[in-house]
Image (cartoon, rainbow, N blue to C red):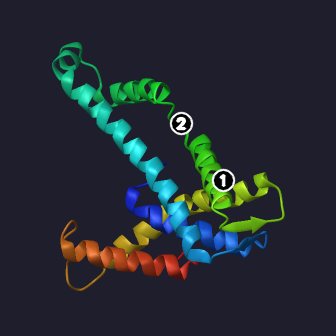
């Protein structure tokens, strides 16, 4: 599943909490640098995907007339082009492989910057990070729906997309994350 960029701080927070609670790691400079490091790598990866998809959209727009003439499904063409460009740019499309790679990048950076020590195998530490990402993804859709239901159930109707709605959504989302121990 595709991760929206605004979720990177929440995932980074979950990673840092899970690493701390794993019992395998000792943070040398506290939890904040761990969060910042994980967030930076997550955001870089998500920005890469965003740039890749923007390039695919450019290609589709350039060939709009031809696609319409040939009655090609835009969505199918999007994925075909994305696969081709991803290979050319060495971008991993499989979410499982990609999150595994991101977990490895995070662990490497934490080690290189001496932010964390651990006494178990590198693979076990990578799995803690990978599982944090997976757990967040599995839970965030449920949390999002819970927040939407709460907003819909309010006496005052709030219109989605407005600043008030977005601010309220963000606050309630953060509260739900805290309630579930993810923030």
Q: Residues within 10 Å of mark 1 (few under 14, many from 20)?
A: some
Against 100, residue 150 (above or below) is below
In-image side of 17 versus 144 (left or right): right
Is residue 59 or residue 117 the one in the foreground?
Answer: 117
Residue at 23% x, 86% y: name it: 155
Q: Position of residue 51 (x, y in %)?
A: 35, 40
* Image mark for residue 175: none
The residue that label 1 is drawn on is: 108
The residue lying at 20 percent from left, 73 percent from top is: 163
Give the x, y percent position of residue 123: 77, 52
N-term-proximal mark, 2 vs 1: 2
CA gap between label 2 and label 1 equals 18 Å
Q: Is residue 139 visible?
A: no
Q: Nearer the viewer, mark 2 or mark 1?
A: 1
Q: Secondary structure at mark 2?
A: loop
| Looking at the image, residue 31 lies above or below residue 63 | below
Q: Position of residue 52 (x, y in %)?
A: 37, 36
Task: Report whether residue 169 is seen.
Answer: yes
Residue bearing mark 2:
92
> Would you identify the image quadrant in which residue 4 lies?
bottom left
Classify mark 2: residues with Cα within 10 Å, few (<14), some (14-19) or many (20+).
some
């Amino acid at each position: 599943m595709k991760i929206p960029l605004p979720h990177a701080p929440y995932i980074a927070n979950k990673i840092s909490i899970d690493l701390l609670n794993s019992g395998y790691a000792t943070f040398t400079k506290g939890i904040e640098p761990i969060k910042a490091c994980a967030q930076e790598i997550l955001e870089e990866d998500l920005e890469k995907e965003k740039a890749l998809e923007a390039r695919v959209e450019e290609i589709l727009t350039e060939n709009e007339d031809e696609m319409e003439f040939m009655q090609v499904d835009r969505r199918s063409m999007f994925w075909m082009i994305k696969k081709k460009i991803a290979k050319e740019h060495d971008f991993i499309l499989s979410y499982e492989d990609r999150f595994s790679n991101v977990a490895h990048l995070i662990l490497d950076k934490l080690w290189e910057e001496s932010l964390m020590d651990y006494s178990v195998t590198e693979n076990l530490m990578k799995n803690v990070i990978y599982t944090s990402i997976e757990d967040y993804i599995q839970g965030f859709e449920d949390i999002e729906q819970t927040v939407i239901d709460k907003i819909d159930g309010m006496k005052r109707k709030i219109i989605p997309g407005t600043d008030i709605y977005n601010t309220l959504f963000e606050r309630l989302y953060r509260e739900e994350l805290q309630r579930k121990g993810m923030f």
